[in-house]
Image (tube, helix red, strand yellow):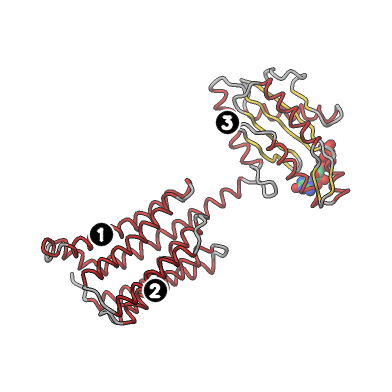
Amino acid sequence: MHFDLFTLGVIGAAIGIAISMSFTLLGLVLRGLPALRIWAIAFWVLTAAAFAQGLNEDGSMLSTIVGGGMIALANALMLMGIAIHLRYPLRWRWPMAVVGLFLANQISVYLSPPSQTVSALMFGAYSVVWDLWMIWVLLWRSPRDMRNTCGFTALIFAIDAVFYLLRSVVVLFPERFASTALDDLLTTWNYLFGILSSFLLSTGFTLMLAERLTLDLRRLAHTDGLTGLLNRGALIEAGLRLVDACRARGQACCVLMFDLDNFKAINDGWGHAAGDAVLNHFVEVIRDTGLAQGALFARYGGEEFVLVLPAIDPAHAGAMAERMCAAVAARPALFHGRPINITTSVGGAAAVDANFEQLVSAADVALYRAKRQGRNQVAWNPGGAVASVVP
Ligand SMILES: Nc1nc2c(ncn2[C@@H]2O[C@H](COP(=O)(O)OP(=O)(O)OP(=O)(O)O)[C@@H](O)[C@H]2O)c(=O)[nH]1
């Protein structure tokens, strides 16, 4: 099968326009994804560059400066899209500086054209620099939970880099490689490879977007919107696993249930916004007391919070609960610069041989006792003995 350059150019243009259109339309539907908009622009610029270079290949100003410059710009946009998507703080000035350097280089190439070998080597080296930069951000600056799709996209850039490296080798050693199978393959595949890699890149970016949206949705489903803590559903899911794992190792687990005292009065007296501020303040105070690694801290309901402390000595858990209760009472919340005094009641349960649900319901019973006994205190179930086994 043999395609002439014109046919390949038409196929390339059609695919370039199709990819750019689909990214633009996707951007109209999925709002709030800046990377998607940047990638859409990058694909349009890349398509326009292919047009500029396809119109005249033999070193014209349109091909060398405009076409070359647009390819550089498309690379910079892709890189910035990746960085923004991964929330890696890369400044625009760095990729743009490389674009500027390349443009200056292309102007000098246009004014005094070097040999074809030098020109091919320069372009190859430049492409490899972009590829390596993107691979580095994708593999070393991506969050762990996005590594799969980033790995796929990095693989496409790696294949692109290998392609340009092989071409450079062929150009550097013409006496060894000219008219060999490798030379034929690289020449025949030059255009097809460009088309294929654009298509695969668009697939890689789409997969990255899909993964980000899925992760964000999952995170939202597990997070309390006000405090950013785990919500009740997520606590139950993680708590069941955590307590079962502790139990299997024969270690004690502790559940502390907090309920802010007279919170309705704060809402009624200060307003709902102040109530929200108090809830966030409470979370901050508990965190500041130093949560152990592996602890689960969640918002259980309105002004109820649960802390699960795995593999903890019950006496230590008891001391922690007292410290937290005292810290909340000692640190008023500030609302518009005015202090709001708060206290919390705490119900605790610790056991080696109870499951999560049993610990939570025992802590709940203890919490009600703490409320009945006058609030601003810690109560344990049963009967105040921290180390007792919950039925
Ligand atoms: N500001 C704010 N208030 C909330 C939120 N969720 C629940 N509440 C309020 O929390 C209050 C809980 O009141 P109650 O259950 O009577 O408890 P309480 O006033 O703390 O009394 P005790 O628990 O007996 O000390 C209600 O007024 C709810 O409207 C929230 O997200 N923000």
User: In the image, is 284 to the left or to the right of 133?
Assistant: right
At label 3, the amino acid type is Leu
Is residue 68 visible to us here? yes
- Towards the viewer: 277 or 235: 277
Q: Secondary structure at mark 1?
A: helix
Spot occupied by residue 196 in the image (x, y as percentages of width and height): 31, 65
- Quarter holding the C terminus is top right
Residue 226 left/right relative to 97: right
The quadrant in which the N terminus is found is bottom left
Say whether disc 3 or disc 2 marks the residue closer to the N-terminus: 2
Q: Is residue 350 above or below residue 213?
A: above
- Front one among 8 and 364: 8
10 Å neighbourhood of mark 1: few (<14), some, or many (≥20)?
some
Q: CA distance from mark 2 to mark 1?
A: 22 Å
Q: Quadrant of residue 383?
A: top right
Q: Which residue is mark 2?
A: 70
Residue designated by label 3: 242
Image quarter for residue 192?
A: bottom left
| Secondary element at tag 2 | helix
